[in-house]
Image (tube, rainbow, N blue to C red):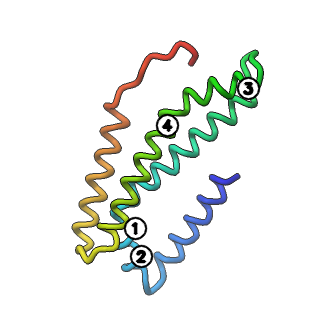
């Protein structure tokens, strides 16, 4: 529910701002930190859904044991989300609020997006026996 409602609210705000007279200011502000922040939100939501699925599908374990199992699996996702939120906060505080031209902020956003794609595509994955 929270992910859906936050997505609807963000979509509504972005849609409203896109047609408002302040659209340029709004998009100039959110562009640089957007890739890291939105990805962090998705990662945090995925970790929460993983925990919730552990409570629903216990795979024959007690709910507490299943929750612990899923928490171990979700911890790296939470860690990545925290790192991305910190990076987004740094960009929001020092780049988004700065007087840099939009092109520079868009370039930073593209570099951030490229880093995320590289992380997701090339980052590798540990073999897991309980998947």
Q: Of all residues shown, which one is farthest toward the top?
A: 129
For label 4, count other residues whose C-alpha is less than 10 Å away and answer few (under 14), some (14-19) or many (20+). Answer: many
Q: Secondary structure at mark 3?
A: helix
In this rendering, which labeled residue sits more in front, label 1 or label 4?
4
Q: Is residue 70 left or right of residue 20?
A: right
> Element at badge 2?
helix
Q: CA distance from mark 4 to mark 3?
A: 20 Å
Task: Report how far apart the C-alphas of labels 1 and 4 lie in the structure.
Answer: 24 Å
Q: Which residue is mark 4?
A: 77
Q: Position of residue 77 (x, y in %)?
A: 49, 37
Q: Which residue is mark 3?
A: 64
List the residue tagged with mark 2.
26
Say which label, 4 or 2, has the lower sequence index: 2
Q: Are marks 1 and 2 in contact (CB under 8 Å)?
A: yes
Answer few, some or many: residues within 10 Å of disc 3's Cα (few below 14, many 20 plus, some between 14 and 19).
few
Which of pointers 1 and 4 lies earlier in the amino acid sequence? 1
Q: Residue at x 61, y 66 (%)?
A: 9
Whichever of callouts 4 and 3 sits on the residue coming sooner in the sequence is 3
Q: Residue 108, image x and y in percent?
A: 26, 59
Mark on residue 58? Answer: none
Q: Is residue 91 shown above or below 78?
A: below
Find out whether the residues at labels 1 and 4 contact each other: C-beta distance under 8 Å. no
Q: CA distance from mark 2 to mark 3?
A: 45 Å
Q: Quickly name the residue at label 1.
A: 30
Tell me residue 47's x, y (percent).
Answer: 57, 38
Q: CA distance from mark 1 to mark 2?
A: 6 Å
Q: Residue shown at 37%/79% (left/top)?
A: 24
Which element type, helix, strand or loop, lies under badge 4?
helix
């Amino acid at each position: 529910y929270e992910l859906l409602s936050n997505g609807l609210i963000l979509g509504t705000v972005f849609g409203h701002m896109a047609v408002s007279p302040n659209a340029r200011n709004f998009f100039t502000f959110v562009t640089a930190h957007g890739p890291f922040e939105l990805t962090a939100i998705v990662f945090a939501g995925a970790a929460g859904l993983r925990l919730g699925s552990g409570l629903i599908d216990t795979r024959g374990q007690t709910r507490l044991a299943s929750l612990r199992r899923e928490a171990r699996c979700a911890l790296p996702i939470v860690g990545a989300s925290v790192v991305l939120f910190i990076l987004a906060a740094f960009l929001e505080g020092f780049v988004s609020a700065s007087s840099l031209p939009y092109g520079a902020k868009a370039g930073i956003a593209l570099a951030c997006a490229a880093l995320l794609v590289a992380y997701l595509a090339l980052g590798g994955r540990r073999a897991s026996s309980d998947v």
